Image: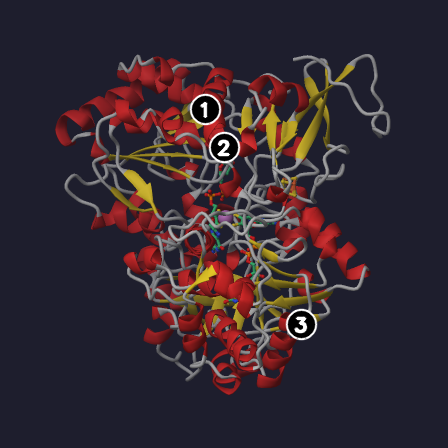
Amino acid sequence: MSPITLSPHHPFTLTRTSDFVRGACPHDCPDTCATLVEVRDGRAVGFHGDPDHPITQGWLCAKVRPYLDRVYSPDRLQYPLRRVGAKGSGEWARISWDEAIAEIAGRWQAIIAEHSAAAILPYSFSGTLGLLQGSVAAVRFWQRMGTTDLDGSLCGIAAETAVKMTLGAGWAPDSRDVVESRLIVIWGHNPASTSPHFVPFLREAQRAGAHVVVIDPRRTTTARSADEHLRPRPATDGALALGLMHVLFTEDLHDEAWLRAHSLGWEELRERAMAYPPDRVEAITGIPAENIVALARRYGTTKPALLKFTDGIQRHGNGGQTCRALACLPAVVGQIGVRGGGLFYSTSGYVKWDGEAFSHRSECPPQPRAFNMNRLGAALTGEVMDPPIQSLYVFSANPVGATPNSSLIVQGMLREDLFTIVHEQFMTDTAQLADIVLPATTQLEQVDLHKPYGQRHLQYNHAAIAPLAEAKSNWDVSRLLATAMGYLEPWLHDEPEDVLREILDASRPKNATLTGITLERLQAEGTVAYSFADTGAVPFADGHFPTPSGKVELRCEAIAALGLDPLPEYEPPAEFVAGLDPDETGNSPLVLITGAAHHFVTTSMANQPALLAKEGTPFIEINPADAAARQIVHGEDVIVSNNRGWCTLRAVITDDVPPGVTVSPKGRWASLSPDRRNVNWVTPDAVADLAGQSTYHSNLIHVRPAATLPDPRLEHAMTAVAD
Ligand SMILES: Nc1nc2c(c(=O)[nH]1)N[C@H]1C(S)=C(S)[C@@H](COP(=O)(O)OP(=O)(O)OC[C@H]3O[C@@H](n4cnc5c(=O)[nH]c(N)nc54)[C@H](O)[C@@H]3O)O[C@H]1N2
Ligand SMILES: Nc1nc2c(c(=O)[nH]1)N[C@H]1C(S)=C(S)[C@@H](COP(=O)(O)OP(=O)(O)OC[C@H]3O[C@@H](n4cnc5c(=O)[nH]c(N)nc54)[C@H](O)[C@@H]3O)O[C@H]1N2
Ligand code: SF4
Ligand SMILES: [Mo]
């Protein structure tokens, strides 16, 4: 590790005894900030955003600014632990790494002999988005062993698939181009919390006269500062998008020349849109027809126009078709390939890692099976049999807190015959139910490479400090497990830098964006911008779309092959169609949306006292009319329930949510809540219309004052486990 050279306008004092080490924020966030860790005598003493990074611009968000509190938290797991009491009892004995690895390998050999490796399930997700510690460590060793695989996504696979199939690639514009936009539609996305480094560019555009529209049922922080806020009923956005198209086509505000030259199926899309006149769309969405017409006229006449969303909006039963409709909209007005216009979803398609270098798939046995990661509880309680899951290995994830229908996960994890290992930085809700807990390093203690989903630079992360106590990185544990299982292939044991170099070198010839980007450059510079040809800097500016037809596929056969209508269509989610019986006083169910909390990244950081204090008591926002109908008083505890489970939250009565809709941000730790639950005790594990997407927000609930009878806790006593 060598000290770096700081630019002359660097605000930090470079003392003789301090080094600054370049890193990257590892969290699931579009911004992937470039960080500078200030290290003195082997200890990190400062943590900063890189002032030279064009998007980070020298600052970190409220949740990651106090990162050293996390790294040096007294609650960090330090040593391997073995459970000595009952599952979930919190009684542990310290063991050595040798004992832990030998015990895990021994149990797995026995499981493999009796059932095959398909009875072993690794479960990891977005604790770190690093190429090595997040992705490679989740693939190589497990594929070599032939374990059960996960498919689908808790997060964003419907949108990713919809955008890729419509436009051919996940190529979002550069945030800096947003200052050129005259109209910015932020649709089901709350960047003030979830992509804060986009916000300065948004403000600059707004100051320069751009009109900002937010489409979100909730009055979010982002909505408050917009010029216009439209509030559709949840999961009706597909109808809204088709309604906008209706107006655009009927008023001749579409760009026909562009559609003829660059798209497939625009006339069929026009015909589909004719089924969505503004009055019908008003009836579906609850947005007045005149507002729909006004937005369509604005979108058809204000250029450049940008449409931006991230991942939250798709977490509905119809999320795939919703994102299809949103992805088609910019094409209707010919705004794709235009600086300041287009679709801003994700930048993750700019670099595709070479699959074989990444996984060494060809050297592994065939994967025995996969199941949808949303259905972990169902899998552990019998949905996946033959062989049943006998061992669960969790890392970079906290499924009890973050995966839907958590009470079923808890029930499964309490199975006496399930051998569970959790590799974690903290004693999470999930770790508490393990048989063996292994201590994990943080980003400051490990090497990695990051490919962002909201900006267009690769970010290298040097290890800034030595691992704390006996913590080990995901890759290091993977190497130890491979040795213990007798897998000696070098690609299971390479040094971190060599793994990254191998993938980078194999990927470079296939990715023009990686031209000239070597591991050595990344190590030296930390941040390296993707390489673009002139027009490439504005995605699709050359009019070529890497779809099968080379055009924007408004009618999309690849989507049809996945069982969806080849044209965007609106259908309400199954949960809303099936409904939920009225409660005992005759009240209809409410929709519960559980989007991002400002001070956490899902459950990460939600155990840090200072951040918890800022977020306050776990709450649910309820509209005054809905609260009155249920005799709920502001500030009292309410029971939120449905046929999946219940949890207790503090009522916040506010018109920030419309009638019929409630909001309770995700991320709370059950074990830090008095009722030992969180909102995921009520969220659905049903899968959406496309690609195995989660459906957290298609969630019908009842809310009652906690003091009233009958107490739904009795009804769900069997799910009150681990109390
Ligand atoms: N502070 C913070 N930042 C985060 C995260 C976090 O937990 N906290 N999580 C990270 C992760 S994992 C992700 S995937 C991204 C997600 O980033 P976003 O997509 O911006 O975040 P969400 O809050 O999940 O969803 C955005 C908005 O969608 C709205 N919404 C829900 N249903 C509908 C609907 O039917 N129609 C419309 N129009 N809007 C709807 C919600 O009210 C919410 O305000 O953020 C990342 N960044
Ligand atoms: N109700 C509701 N729930 C949701 C969502 C929602 O909208 N509503 N959103 C979903 C979304 S978008 C996502 S992405 C998922 C995220 O779900 P998860 O991927 O489970 O993410 P986290 O809850 O942040 O938990 C990540 C854990 O990984 C640990 N960790 C971090 N780095 C490392 C590492 O290097 N090694 C190891 N071994 N561990 C590490 C952290 O300490 C943390 O406990 O949550 C989903 N949950
Ligand atoms: S969570 Fe996002 S905004 Fe915050 S430091 Fe990390 S990358 Fe930057
Ligand atoms: Mo996510």
Compute the Cα span from label 3 to label 1: 45 Å
Q: Foreground residue, 177 or 710? A: 177
Quadrant of the image for the N terminus?
Answer: top right
Q: Residue 374: percent from the left, percent from the top?
A: 36, 51
Quarter of the figure with residue 296: bottom right
Disc 3: which residue: 301
Going by the numbered disc 2, the residue's amino acid type is: Asn
Residues packed near mark 1 inside 10 Å, few (<14), some (14 to 19) or many (20 plus): many
* Tag nearer the camera, 2 or 1: 2
Mark toward the start of the polypeptide (3 vs 1): 3
Q: Residue 332: percent from the left, percent from the top?
A: 53, 67
Mark toward the start of the polypeptide (2 vs 1): 1
The CB of the residue at mark 2 lies under 8 Å from ligand 3: no
Relative to 624, is 618 above or below?
Answer: above
Going by the numbered disc 1, the residue's amino acid type is: Ile
Disc 1: which residue: 503
Q: Is mark 1 on a helix, strand or loop?
A: helix
Q: Can residue 442 be seen in this view?
A: no
Residues packed near mark 2 inside 10 Å, few (<14), some (14 to 19) or many (20 plus): some
Going by the numbered disc 3, the residue's amino acid type is: Thr
Compute the Cα span from label 3 to label 2: 36 Å
User: Looking at the image, which residue sits at the far bottom?
Assistant: 279
526 displayed left or right of 374: right
Compute the Cα span from label 2 to label 1: 12 Å
Disc 2: which residue: 511
- Which residue is depicted at the point 56% across and 48% down? 542
Q: Residue 272: percent from the left, percent from the top?
A: 41, 76
